[in-house]
Image (spheres, helix red, strand yellow):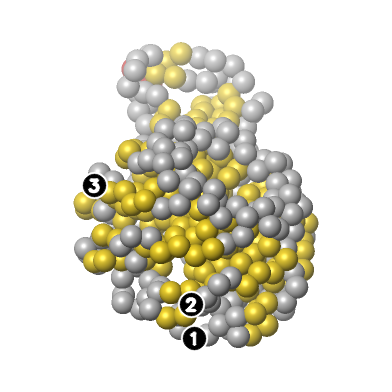
Amino acid sequence: MIDSKFYCANTTCLPFINIITLNIKNCQFACLSQSQCIAATFHRSTSNCELFDNILNQNENMLTDVDAISMNVISGTQFPSEPTTTSTSTTTSSSSTSAATTIACNVFLNQTTYAVGFQPISVAVADVNSDNKPDIVVANRNSNTVSVLLNAGSGTFDAQTTYTVGTQPYQVAVVDVNNDNKPDIIVTNSGANNISVLLNAGSGTFNTQIIYTAGSSPYSVAVVDVNGDNKPDIIITNWGSNNVGVLLNAGNGTFNAQTTYAVGFNPQSVAVVDVNSDNKPDIIVANWGANNIGILLNAGSGTFHTQTTYSVGTRPYSVAVVDVNSDNKPDIIVANSGSNSTGVLLNAGNGTFSAQTSYPAGNFPWSVAVVDVNTDSKPDIIVTNSNSNDIDVLLNAGNGTFNTQIVYTVGSSPSSVAVVDVNQDNKPDIIVAKATSSSVAVLLHC
């Protein structure tokens, strides 16, 4: 029946996911790529696509609604869970569509939450106890602690162990800084104007913090060898000082005093990646108050040139640097918190970038990660939307373009995201810090 929306008249047939798609064809593909999806409903006025897991149309116990098209999956036409080119067919109330494509599973299961400290604002995922299972490390801004949740197997985690750091820890990184093959914790303390380094003591435990002076309100941190001595260095954004600080590794997990480089107003986020193919990592910073991205090319010996800026959206809050169009040149992806968009700046070569292409996001996109989540060898974008309490997944459509976001509701102001396989099934999972519920959530890949 054209213009009819079908719901099962019982509690066992509810949509297991809502997404926004550009057209009915994309809604069809979304359903066919999920092994759980038996039927879908596409709302033409809103572009909302509802996927169902148990349509019992043979029982004729359905309710109707207008302004929607119902689609039922024909048995045997589901895309396989692993990437395979296949012929598919979908029957709708008004037409039939056939397509040949390659789509892998791209759905994440319902979240499991774990208690941490108050206002968890940053999350990192790394194996800290050498058991080959990634663990969760969280910066708890209003508890002045970091939490360590060891992986208990099968994507579950033990209760947190906490370690004291400075006032208002803002971002955490987990990297081996003293070459003992055990990852250490590095955290910026925005309220104390310093950095804490907690060396790994073994078995997933950590020593008391060592403190290094930073600038005013250090927010973001990256830990990368920038001077080619095979020792990871610390790079931070000093939000209140309008600069980035570089602390070179002096050996044995100790660091020299910071050298600062001027950037834009209120630098919020930093990434350190070689963007001009000279084998020297460069600094990329999101200047929140200036509405631009700053690029500081590495001049050698751990020093950096003056920034070059590129305009982005309003209030850029988080930046990632990953090659998204398979040209072997890293591109810039930015969450624009004030304009509710995700920006993609493709690398034009020699460390220069094209103007951003914007994609709609939720309300106040905060944190961005770029990882291939559907096993098609193309990195996808994952964004937390703090004010709309959800996560966007934008699948890579090829050539550095992205499909409309798939939305996962998580609640409680998601502030930070990491995308790592935590249950050893070779599929990346989503780990998100939820600022207002004192918890982290784990969404396992289907």
Q: Amino acid at mark 2?
A: Asn
Residue positioned 73% across, 49% down in the render:
289
- Residue identified by numbered label 1: 229
17 relative to 363 in the view: left or right: left
Look at the numbered discs 1 and 2 and tell me whether their residues touch, using CB distance below 8 Å.
Answer: yes
Classed neighbour count for the residue bearing mark 2: other residues with Cα under 10 Å, few (<14), some (14–19), many (≥20): many
Q: Position of residue 103 (x, y in %)?
A: 46, 53
Q: Amino acid at mark 3?
A: Asp
Marked residue nearer the N-terminal end (1 or 2):
1
Q: Is residue 423 above or below residue 77?
A: below
Measured in 3D between alpha carbons, the distance from the residue under mark 1 to the one under mark 2, in whole angstroms, is 9 Å
Residue positioned 55% across, 19% down in the render:
4
- Residue identified by numbered label 3: 158
Q: Nearer the viewer, mark 1 or mark 2?
A: 2
**Callout 1 secondary element:** loop
Classed neighbour count for the residue bearing mark 3: other residues with Cα under 10 Å, few (<14), some (14–19), many (≥20): some
Q: Position of residue 140 (x, y in %)?
A: 43, 45
Q: Is residue 152 above or below residue 91?
A: below
Residue 123 is tagged as none
Q: Is residue 391 above or below residue 358?
A: above
* Residue 72, picture quadrant: top left
* Residue 189 appears in the rendering: yes
**Callout 2 secondary element:** strand
- Residue identified by numbered label 2: 249
Q: Amino acid at mark 1?
A: Asp
Marked residue nearer the N-terminal end (2 or 3):
3
**Callout 3 secondary element:** loop
Seen from the viewer's position, the closer of residues 29 and 352 is 352
Measured in 3D between alpha carbons, the distance from the residue under mark 3 to the one under mark 1, in whole angstroms, is 37 Å
